[in-house]
Amino acid sequence: MMKFAEPVTIQEDEHEFAYLKSLIKKRMGFNCDDYKQPHLKRRLAVRLRATQSRSYKEYAGILMKDENEPPRLKETLTINVTEFFRNPETYEAFRREALPLLVKAREGTKIIKAWSAGCSNGEELCSIAIMLLEFLGASARKYNIQLLGTDIDDESLEKAKSGIYQPKILEKMSKERLDRFFIYKDACYQVKDEIRGRVNFKRHDMISDPPLRGFDIIFCRNVTIYFDQKLQEKLYLNFYNALNDNGFFVMGKTESLVGPADGLFKPVDPRERIYQKGRKL
Ligand SMILES: C[S@@+](CC[C@H](N)C(=O)[O-])C[C@H]1O[C@@H](n2cnc3c(N)ncnc32)[C@H](O)[C@@H]1O
């Protein structure tokens, strides 16, 4: 008969917790201080249970000794769940309410720059690319479309750069889109050059790296939900400043604008969390 390991009871000691956080920062360069602490404890508990550790101190010992543990912990902390056209109604609203205004405003320069901040494996940035190319149609070739995806998870960035996705990930994609934007090879789908030539993925930590600038569209979805309110307020202001005039900001459906940025952004579709840089009406 198969035997299961007894679930361990974790002793939570605040000093040990503080020590573990400093170790994570030193060993992995991952600053947990700005994460919501109950969330952080829940994520750490996943690894403590997996390693049968009874305390933060015991787990700290494993993190020091076992070279496989830091990448596992990082994967648990960053949670890179994503999908193509996550919440399709948000993309539909963006296409309907934001893109006509943006394309009109960029008729002169014909440059459109978009940023997926916390892009995970790249599905979000590809969805933005598909949405833009479909909207622009034949005139897309007259536009200089520059799309940037950033994340702190190197493994996710590598996957994003490859542009290769398992068929299961693309299950919900229409056949028309699959045929137009992907090539089927070696039992996987790869994003075609029409998109690959316009996207760029790089490591950028939105908490500690210098803020980026000059975008017309920013999607930062399902990332700030894990951060405490003070940090959220700072990041939303950074995103406001990172947008060109009349640019658009899109958040996750369970996230809310807080802090000074709430008074600066103009709501375009609050239900879909679509905002524009400009004065409130
Ligand atoms: C749940 S995924 C969201 C992916 C995508 N935006 C979406 O909504 O489908 C969160 C991503 O944010 C990334 N992330 C977490 N902290 C970050 C930070 N400080 N800077 C940049 N990316 C971060 C994680 O590595 C992860 O890939």
Image: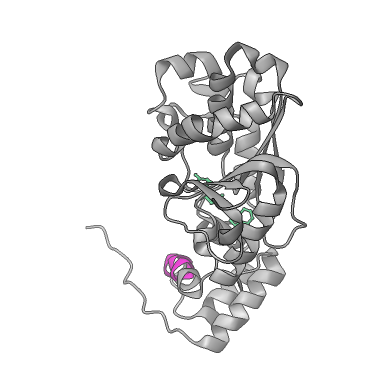
Q: Position of residue 246 (x, y in %)?
A: 65, 41
Q: Quadrant of the N terminus?
A: bottom left
Q: Main secondary structure of the magenta part?
A: helix
Q: Residue at x 54, y 59 (%)?
A: 224
Q: Residue at x 59, y 77 (%)?
A: 20
Q: Is residue 165 left or right of residue 196?
A: left
Q: Is residue 57 left or right of residue 170?
A: right
Q: Is residue 37 left or right of residue 103?
A: left
The stretch of residues the image draws in magenta is 42-50
Does residue 22 lie above or below 244 as drawn?
below
Does residue 19 lie above or below 145 as drawn?
below
Most foreground residue, 261 or 48: 261
**Which quadrant holds residue 17?**
bottom right
The stretch drawn in magenta includes residue 47: yes
The stretch drawn in magenta includes residue 125: no
**Which quadrant holds residue 30?**
bottom right
